[in-house]
Image (cartoon, rainbow, N blue to C red):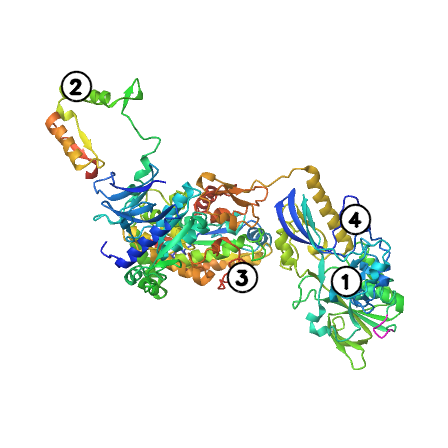
Amino acid sequence: MDYKNVLTTCVYCGCGCGLYLEVLDGRVIGVWPAKTHEITDGKLCIKGWNIDGFIYHEDRLKTPLIRKDGHLVEASWDEALSLVAEKLGTIKAESGPDSIAFLSSAKGTNEENYLLQKLSRAVIGTNNVDHCARL
Amino acid sequence: MMDAGRHPNITLMTYSEVEEVSGYIGQFKVKVRQRPRYVDMDLCTGCGACVEACVFKKGVPNEFDEGLSRRKGVYIPMNGQGVPMKAVIDEDACLFLHRGKCVKKCMDACPTNAIDFDQKERLVDLEVGSIVVATGFDKFDAARLSAYSWGKSPNIIDGLQFERLSSATGPTKGEILTAEGIKPSRVAIIHCVGSRDENANRYCSRVCCMYALKHAHLVRDKTGAEVFEFYMDIRAFGKGYEEFYERVQEEGVYFVRGRGAEIVVLENGKLQIKAEDTTLGIPVAIDVDMAILATAMEPQTDADHVAALFGLSRSADGFFQEAHPKLRPFHTNTDGVFLAGTCQSPKDVPDTVAHANAAAAEALVILDRGEVLISPTTAMVVEERCVGCGDCVLVCPYSAISLLNSKAHLNSALCKGCGTCVATCPSGAIEALHFTDQQIVAEIEGVLAWQ
Amino acid sequence: MNEQPVPSIIEAIRQTVAERLQELDGVVALRRSSEGVAPHVFQQGDDLSELEIVPRYPLTTVVSRLHKSFPEIRLGIVARGCDERAFVEMAKRNQIDPDRLFILGIACTAEEAEECHCAAPFPKHLVVGKPVAPGSPNPVVAEYDNTPLAKRNAFWRRQFAKCIKCYGCRNICPECFCEDCAMEDPAWVEPGLLAPPFPVFHLIRAMHMASRCVACRQCDLTCPAHIPLTVLYDLMRRDMEATLGYIPGEDIKAPPPLSVTLNEAPLLVNTGHMD
Amino acid sequence: MAVEEFEPRIVAFMCNWCTYAGADNAGVARLESPANILPIRVMCSGRISPELVLRTFREGADGVLVMGCHLGDCHYSSGNHRTIKRIPLLKSLLGFAGINPERLQLEWVSAAEGPRFTQVTKAFVERVRTLGPLSEEVAA
């Protein structure tokens, strides 16, 4: 019987609510709001309360998928990133940098989002950057 | 009764009471408490030698004679004519069992050594496929209606007491005599005592009219006394009944149409019956030597206990409720349990026989068929949704749900489909087949489409 | 965080837990780490100086999960009055095995009792601390009989309009342990619709709470919209006590009154339907 | 032009054995019952969960009648023992939430009580008529 609660931050939006993942014998079994969290004070929204839902979900993606002959097939990260780099390069060469847009996510951290816009502006050369939390 | 006692497939369990019933149609488990009879049923031949020998001469009131005679501590029920015709020792009357002191002449007298004071109460477990409840009725206690002066004169008797008076095995060997031991010259018979009366029972007891007419006939025939019948209506509904009513009228019985309102015990010991003769529209007062009350049939006083035991419901009058008043008159809402006779409603002998035969036949049909059809309108547990809280187990009126491995488990043979569990389950883990939430919601949407 | 308990109480309960761990498989309590305070199962050898008694978490839920996962395990729980009451209602509904749970009761402080409007701020199995007087009843509840229908209506409409349907009230509730929740059934609660005109969400929950709510106030505390849900549940509890004599969490032998017949749990008031 | 009178829409849940037969009895006796009553048959009044009643209000009913057998007459012997506790509790809750509890009513009508069926349904319709539409009470 190894029971513990692991403090983490909700990844669903930029609020960053504190929560505990309840872990029993190495498996996440639930969520507790962090009552001693200075900011969120033991409160969560429906997304935070269900943060554990995707962990063991059968639909969860564990590797990148590449569409081949109309079907999505599992691929390695190296393979997938090479493909993305290659295609972005081709599109930029053929249609210019503004034919590409970057959409970032609240599930990423500040730093990750910074890096994405940096990629967009400095590497690709476009200001087409947006974020789901801006809606 | 004799035939039932002799039948090889019928076991009579006398002095017994059902303690517990579980299971369901086809597989009932019945626990029966069998009280000691203190007489070995296999050895007793019913010769009556023990009764003769019993030293308790004073005895106790004989219930079979409605208290008009007395019997001893050991006796053969029904004045020696009971079924089975074997002796029984009454714990409360037997000097040995009651007071611990007796010479036990009965043991000496018994030619087969059947008397056994060491018998103990025992619990018998039975497994049966169907059950017929035939617990009968209780006599209305006329003391509840003070106007009839019940208990104030030994010459105010009820119909059953009169039956004993006029029976050849009764206390007077069939002679109709007043308490003073003389033939009455005027007799009143009062109908509807405790029946059709807002102060007692609203229903008609159905049998009283005809037995009251019979009593009138017997009094006329055996004593020649004048007979006054106080009645509201004569309900002579059965085959040959109306003809009998006419015959009694022709025998010179006076019929006074009006409820017997009051019996006054006069100073000379005679009884004065007061009533309104509604055909003449005048009050009447008639002095008689004997008054016979046609008392109502009532549910047994422990009917609630029996109902709970067998899962029966009771109608407003207190009798056991049949499944349908016309089409299922001897079925109950517990499959495999049937009603016979007056525990269901007042009945006369032919109706009781018909009812009982029907119930017996239906009980046999189940056993013979070996399988039962159940209604598709039952509950259904959706196990994935069940959290095992057990509220449904508490709620089920038929004990059809139990917890199995922390999940609700439904026995659909027991379920009647009331759906109370469905309404109780907080997690929607039980569906009422044919009355699902989805179906009812669709109906709600449907009816509210009306503007 | 700002209400540090009297040191002697926490020392005493740490001592008790240490002793009971000799014979129990674990004790459910709160543990402080660098990450904050969270529910924990203390086992032999654990550093009991980490054991805390604030803030309040529904620890019986942890017990239930462990009892279901380990059918032999014998646990203790550091319990306040509300935890003990929650245990009683959960045990009644087969979510905790009462033979495998031992209450190590602590009393709440007078301030805590007042903050919770708690009618019984200490468990029956009290081990540490002195019982304090009940807190004063919630003034909204106390005044409710004199509150006209229209005012009640306006009050709750305002409250329910704030609801973001996070289901936190249900999630934190020790008495909400269903596998499938009626409030997630689209037949009853419209999915994807906030603050519908007819507040089915909150009314269903209030009905389900009537014979279960042990007034632990966890739902009030966790509601991000600050809806005073326990006002509604307190009113329901009051109604249940008046009509059926039932106080959730009071008696482990009393069956849930709405599930049994009138013979087993009679109505104490005549609702005009007795014939 | 005269103001059109408000016609409340009332859903009546009736148990199969008593009230539904009682409504039938009223019909056979040619007694008039208000057309505002929208009947839904269930096997027992104990089948009516708070969820169903609340859904009925959500769906726009101005009143809900729950009708079953008198105590002691329940076809299922004690199904209505739950109804008699559950429905008044739900009424209390409606009152606490500021929704007029008179919009929900529990009535026992036996299979023989056709006249009573018409009487209680008429009285309830008139009562709800004076309360006005539910939509006005919960909106605005």
Marks 3 and 4: same chain?
no
Report the Cα–Cα distance between label 2 and label 1.
Answer: 110 Å
| Image x and y of residue B272, in percent | 78, 77
Q: Which residues are magenta?
A: B177-181
Which is closer to the viewer, label 4 or label 2?
A: 4
Q: Front-most of B48 and C270? A: B48
Report the Cα–Cα distance between label 3 and label 4.
Answer: 44 Å
The residue to which callout 1 is attached is B209
Number of the label disc, if any, that sits on residue A90: 2
Marks 1 and 4: same chain?
yes
Determine whether the residue tagged by mark 4 lies in a helix, strand or loop: helix
* Residue B132 vertical position relative to residue B226 in the rendered view, above or below: above
The amino acid type of the residue labelled 4 equals Ala
The furthest residue to the top: A69
Report the Cα–Cα distance between label 1 and label 3.
Answer: 35 Å
The residue to which callout 3 is attached is C274
Q: Front-most of C122 and C154? A: C122
- Disc 2 crowd rating (10 Å Cα; few below 14, some 14-19, many 20+) is few
